[in-house]
C-alpha cells in the first residue's frame, strides 16, 4: 500500500479547498442571479398609477342625464336619486296619494365616458344615455357642455355622443384588448356614485366572460373597483390606452366588474360615427353549442363546432342549402368552436359579402357559399319572442328528426326533444330532463318547435301547463308546471 508524503498531502488539501471555494463562489453567484431573476418576475406591481391618471383624466368625462318619466304610484316609489338614496317621503305620498292620476317625474342618472378625438366624440354606454331628454357632459376642468346622441347600439350597450367646443379637446388613445392577459394590471377611471374622476386599479380576472346581457357577450372581468356611475368609463392598460369600456357589475359580487373589449367596440364606434347606426351580418339559423353528449352522438373527436337547430326559410343559410343538424365548423378558413364565436364572426361580415362555410353533415364535410344578409332586429325580435317561451321555462327544444326518432325507438316523426335545461328552472323543478320528447302541451299535439313556441306563448302567466312526453327506457310521462 503506497504512502503519501506530507508535503504532497498539503498540496492535495489546498487544491481541494481552492476547488471547493471556487465552486461555492460560482454557486453563490448563480443563486443570487436566479434570486434576482425571480424577484424581477415577481415584483410587477407598478410604483404608482399617477402618470396614467394625469395623462388620461382630462379626457374622461362625467355624464348626467335627465328624462321625464310618466308614473306616480309604484314607478315613483322605486325611484332613486343618482347616489342610490331613496326619497324619505315617498312611502308617505304613496300611502296617502297612491290613487292620484299619473304624473310626470324628472329622473336623473349619471355615468362616465371618454373623449376619442379632438372634435368631441365621446364613447359611453347605451344605458347611460338611452331615452334621455337632456345630456350634460362635465370635464375635469369643470367646463360643462350639452351633448347630443350620434348613435346607439343596444345590442352591445354602446353609445356615441358629441359635444361642441371652440377649442380642441383632450382625447385618449385606444389600445388592443386582444393583447390583454389574465393577471395583467388595469386602471379604471370614472364617476362612481357621482364622485368624479375616481381612479381605481386591479387586474384582469378573466377574459371572454358571458354574463347573459346580450348576443355579443365577450366581457373582460376585472377586480378594479367599479360601481354605479363608472358605466361608460375607460378601462386602461399601463400605457394609458383604453382596452375596455366599463359596463356592468355583478349584483352582490363585490369587486367583480365587467368591461366591453375595445376591439369589439372599435367597428361599432366607427359605424355609429359615420351613419349613426350599426349594420350586422345575418345568416338566418338557430344554433346551439356542441356539448359532450352531442359530440359523442355525432361522432366528433372534440365538443367543438356549432349545431344548426333551425334554418329560417328565405334567409341566406336556407338559400345556400344549409340544413338543420348541420354542424358549422369553419367560416372563410377560420375555425368556429362555439355559438358565440359564430355570432361575432357573422356580425362583422359586410352585408352582401359571400363567405365560404364548412359544415359536417353525416360526418362528411360539405362546403357552401353564402351571401350574408342584413340583420333585421325587428324580424329577429319577433322570432325571439317565441324562443323566449323556451327560456322562460328554462328549456330549449329541437325538432325530432328521423334519426333522433330511431335512436329513441319512436315509431313516428313528430314532437320536440329537450336538448338543454337550466338547473333550478321551472322545467327542471317539474322533473323535465334532457332527451325527453314532448308530444303534447295542454292536450294539443306538438309537431315541431314552432308548434311548441306558439302553444306556450298563448298560455298566460301563472297558468298551469300539462306536458305529455316520452322518456328513453322509461316510457310515457305527464309533467305539470306553472308558467
Image (tube, rainbow, N blue to C red):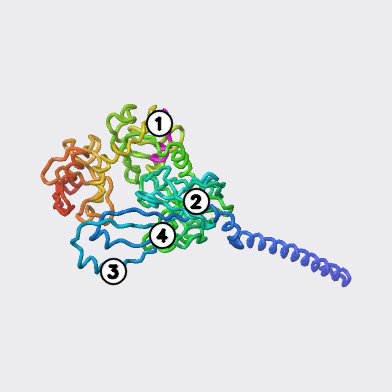
Query: Which residue, given by chain and number where applicable, does mark 2 sit on?
Result: 114
Q: Nearer the viewer, residue 219 or 407?
A: 219
**Nearest to N terminus: mark 2 or mark 1:** 2
**Nearest to N terminus: mark 1 or mark 3:** 3
Q: How far apart are marks 2 and 3 (CA)?
A: 37 Å
| Quarter of the image where one finds residue 366 | top left
Where's residue 373, x and y in %? 36, 31
Looking at the image, do the residues carrying marks 2 and 3 touch, with CB atoms under 8 Å apart?
A: no
Q: How far apart are marks 2 and 1 (CA)?
A: 30 Å
Q: Give the mark count.
A: 4
**Nearest to N terminus: mark 2 or mark 3:** 3
Q: Residue furthest left?
A: 443
| Quarter of the image where one finds residue 96 | bottom left
- Label 4 secondary element: loop
Name the mark on residue 89.
3
Query: Which residue, given by chain and number where applicable, does mark 4 sit on?
Result: 228
Which callout, 1 or 3, points to the residue nearer the camera?
3
- Label 2 secondary element: strand
Q: Which of 230 and 194 is in front in this view?
A: 194
Please rate how many residues cluster around mark 2, counting C-alpha atoms within 10 Å: few if below 14, some from 14 to 19, many from 20.
many
Q: Which residue lies furthest to the bottom in this view?
A: 6
Please rate how many residues cluster around mark 4, counting C-alpha atoms within 10 Å: few if below 14, some from 14 to 19, many from 20.
many
Query: Which residue, given by chain and number where applicable, does mark 1 sit on?
Result: 351
Which callout, 2 or 3, points to the residue nearer the camera?
3
**Nearest to N terminus: mark 4 or mark 1:** 4
Where's residue 139, x and y in %? 51, 55
Name the mark on residue 384.
none
Amino acid at each position: 500500500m503506497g504512502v503519501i508524503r506530507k508535503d504532497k498531502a498539503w498540496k492535495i488539501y489546498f487544491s481541494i479547498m481552492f476547488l471547493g471555494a471556487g465552486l461555492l463562489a460560482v454557486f453563490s453567484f448563480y443563486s443570487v442571479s436566479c434570486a434576482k431573476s425571480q424577484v424581477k418576475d415577481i415584483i410587477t406591481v407598478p410604483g404608482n398609477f399617477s402618470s396614467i391618471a394625469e395623462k388620461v383624466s382630462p379626457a374622461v368625462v362625467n355624464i348626467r342625464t335627465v328624462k321625464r318619466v310618466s308614473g306616480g304610484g309604484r314607478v315613483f316609489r322605486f325611484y332613486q336619486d343618482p347616489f342610490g338614496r331613496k326619497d324619505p317621503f315617498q312611502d308617505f305620498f304613496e300611502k296617502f296619494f297612491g290613487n292620484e292620476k299619473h304624473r310626470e317625474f324628472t329622473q336623473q342618472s349619471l355615468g362616465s365616458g371618454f373623449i376619442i378625438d379632438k372634435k368631441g366624440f365621446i364613447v359611453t354606454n347605451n344605458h347611460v344615455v338611452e331615452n334621455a331628454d337632456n345630456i350634460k357632459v362635465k370635464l375635469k376642468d369643470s367646463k360643462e357642455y350639452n351633448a347630443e346622441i350620434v348613435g346607439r347600439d343596444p345590442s352591445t350597450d354602446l353609445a356615441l355622443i358629441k359635444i361642441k367646443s371652440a377649442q380642441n379637446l383632450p382625447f385618449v388613445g385606444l389600445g388592443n384588448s386582444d393583447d390583454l392577459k389574465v393577471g395583467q394590471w388595469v386602471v379604471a377611471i370614472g364617476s362612481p356614485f357621482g364622485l368624479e374622476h375616481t381612479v381605481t386599479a386591479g387586474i384582469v380576472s378573466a377574459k371572454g366572460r358571458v354574463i347573459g346581457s346580450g348576443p355579443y357577450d365577450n366581457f373582460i372581468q376585472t377586480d378594479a373597483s367599479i360601481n354605479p356611475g363608472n358605466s361608460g368609463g375607460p378601462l386602461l392598460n399601463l400605457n394609458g390606452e383604453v382596452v375596455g369600456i366599463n359596463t356592468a357589475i355583478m349584483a352582490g359580487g363585490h369587486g367583480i366588474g365587467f368591461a366591453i373589449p375595445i376591439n369589439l367596440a372599435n367597428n361599432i364606434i366607427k359605424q355609429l360615427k359615420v351613419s349613426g347606426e350599426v349594420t350586422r351580418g345575418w345568416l338566418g339559423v338557430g344554433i346551439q353549442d356542441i356539448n359532450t353528449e352531442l359530440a359523442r352522438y355525432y361522432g366528433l373527436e372534440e365538443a367543438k363546432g356549432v349545431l344548426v337547430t333551425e334554418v329560417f326559410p328565405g334567409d341566406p343559410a336556407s338559400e345556400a342549402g344549409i340544413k338543420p343538424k348541420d354542424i358549422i365548423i369553419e367560416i372563410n378558413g377560420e375555425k368556429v368552436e362555439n355559438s358565440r364565436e359564430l355570432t361575432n364572426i357573422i356580425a362583422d361580415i359586410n352585408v352582401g359579402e359571400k363567405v365560404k362555410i364548412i359544415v359536417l353533415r353525416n360526418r362528411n364535410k360539405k362546403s357552401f357559399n353564402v351571401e350574408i344578409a342584413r340583420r333585421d332586429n325587428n324580424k329577429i325580435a319577433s322570432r325571439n319572442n317565441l324562443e323566449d317561451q323556451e327560456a322562460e321555462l328554462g328549456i330549449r327544444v329541437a325538432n325530432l328528426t328521423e334519426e333522433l326518432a330511431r335512436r329513441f325507438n319512436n315509431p313516428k316523426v313528430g314532437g320536440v326533444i329537450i336538448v338543454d335545461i337550466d338547473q333550478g328552472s321551472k322545467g327542471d323543478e317539474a322533473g323535465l330532463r334532457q332527451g325527453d320528447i314532448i308530444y303534447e302541451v295542454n292536450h294539443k299535439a306538438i309537431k315541431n318547435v314552432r308548434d311548441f313556441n306558439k302553444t306556450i306563448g298563448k298560455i298566460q302567466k301563472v297558468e298551469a301547463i300539462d306536458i305529455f312526453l316520452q322518456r328513453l327506457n322509461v316510457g310515457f310521462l305527464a309533467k305539470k308546471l306553472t308558467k
